Image: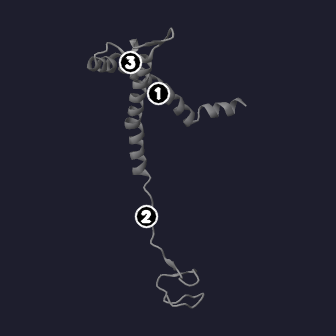
Amino acid sequence: MLKGFKEFILRGNVVDMAVGIVIGAAFGTVVTALVKDFLTPFIAAIVAAPNFSGLTFTLNGSQFMYGDLLNALISFLILAIAVYFFVVLPINKLTETFHKAPPVEPPKTKACPQCLSDIPLAATRCAHCTQPV
């Protein structure tokens, strides 16, 4: 029983997935820090707001902190853009180069217009219904 578990854990795709999750979490932290410490102040300087995380509004005594939501949305968009341009596109290009579609062979037969059976391209008469083609 433990031997099967050991084989499962040491299988390549499980280890690759674990490494991908760890690197993805670290990358998410880096992107969040980039947004929080660099992009948010840069955007805030353009729109004259000191920090998005301080943006709030009050409704019936409840305070809604929509600035944190803006920071999270910017982080998500940057992370999605980075994953698309630095992971998805290169992998798609790489798989295109290795997995080219096989060349399409020209058809060797055609359909008879009368009985719709397959006949050779060079045939002048259908072998099934003797219709001239």
The correct choice, above or below, for 19 with respect to 88 in the image is above
Residue 65 coordinates in the image, percent (x, y): 45, 14
Viewer-side residue, 34 vs 24: 34
The label shown at residue 103 is: 2
**Residue 8 place in picture, x, y as percent:** 63, 34
Task: Characterize the local packing of mark 2: few (<14), some (14-19) or many (20 or more) Cα atoms within 10 angstroms.
Answer: few
| Residue type indicated by callout 2 | Pro
At mark 2, the secondary structure is loop
* Picture residue at 38% right of the left edge, 33% below the top: 81
* Residue 57: numbered disc: none
Q: Give the spatial CA distance, label 3 vs label 2.
A: 49 Å
Q: Which amino acid does label 3 sit on?
A: Ala
The answer to whether residue 29 is visible is no
Q: Residue at coordinates 39% horizontally, 14% vertically from top-left? A: 55
C-alpha distance separating marks 1 and 2: 38 Å
CB-based contact (under 8 Å), mark 3 and mark 2: no
Q: Residues within 10 Å of mark 3 (few under 14, many from 20)?
A: some
Residue that carries the numbered disc 3 in the rendered image: 33
What residue occupies the far front of the structure in this picture?
60
Local packing at callout 1 (Cα closer than 10 Å; few below 14, some 14-19, many 20+) is some
Which residue in the protein does label 1 denote? 24
Q: Tell whether label 3 touches label 1 (CB within 8 Å).
A: no
